[in-house]
Amino acid sequence: MFDKMLGMGRIFSFKNRMVVNHEKVSILVVNMPLDDAEYCGRIRDHLAIVAEAADLAIDNVCARLEAVRRAQEMLHIAAITRSAVEELRTTYRDIQISARLELETMTDSIEGMYLSLGLTNRQEATVSDVVRHATGRVLDLLELGSTLDASFTRIVGQLAPTDEIPTVEEKADPGFESIELW
């Protein structure tokens, strides 16, 4: 019935019934007081205003729901990003530790081979200096990673939720349900 009435124009009257249509709202009056034309005109005017206000309220609710949906989506994206950055930070720290251990193992292995290689003390010292110098440079590069770690910490801090994003809550009232935003 309402679908048919939508095609009949903004305000349509038939006997003692009247329909006021707006984009998203239709109001049906089933018992108009036909004996008082001035009163009918005021009802028609007031119902047109009510229908327009209801249509604007629907637009407002839809805009708020969309804002809440987008905010929740952004929180979800931030949480995923925060998790990925924390995983990168952990992986990077593990790589730093592994690289240090490998460098130590390599240095110890090279120094342990001196006897079997038959090197002179001076040759041993030269090889040890080269290995320790290269190891030191690699460790210095790994220490530059503390800047990277600070960047990870800053990014994770900026992605951490600071305020709760409003959600849509359904509250049951006696006889009907209403939706309350914020």
Image (cartoon, rainbow, N blue to C red):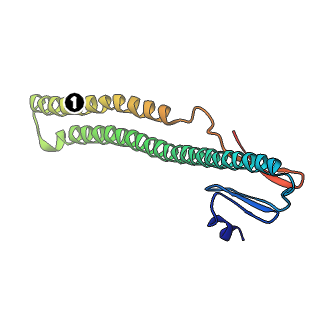
- The amino acid at mark 1 is Arg
Q: Tag 1: Cα neighbours inside 10 Å, few (<14), some, or many (≥20)?
A: few
Q: Is residue 51 left or right of residue 69?
A: right
Residue at 68%, 56% in the rendered image:
25
- Using the image as rendered, state which of residue 81 and residue 25 is in the foreground: 25
Residue at 32%, 37% in the rendered image:
100
Using the rendered view, name the quadrant where residue 85 is placed: top left
Which structural element holds mark 1? helix
- Using the image as rendered, state which of residue 49 and residue 94 is in the foreground: 49
- Using the image as rendered, state which of residue 163 and residue 126 is in the foreground: 163
Q: Which residue is mark 1?
A: 137
Q: Is residue 42 left or right of residue 108?
A: right
Q: Quadrant of the C terminus?
A: top right
Q: Is residue 59 left or right of residue 104?
A: right
- Using the image as rendered, state which of residue 88 and residue 173 is in the foreground: 173
Q: Position of residue 118 (x, y in %)?
A: 11, 40
Q: Position of residue 99 (x, y in %)?
A: 31, 41
Residue at 30%, 29% in the rendered image:
144
Q: Is residue 52 above or below residue 9?
A: above
Q: Position of residue 54 (x, y in %)?
A: 69, 48
Most distant residue in the right direction: 174
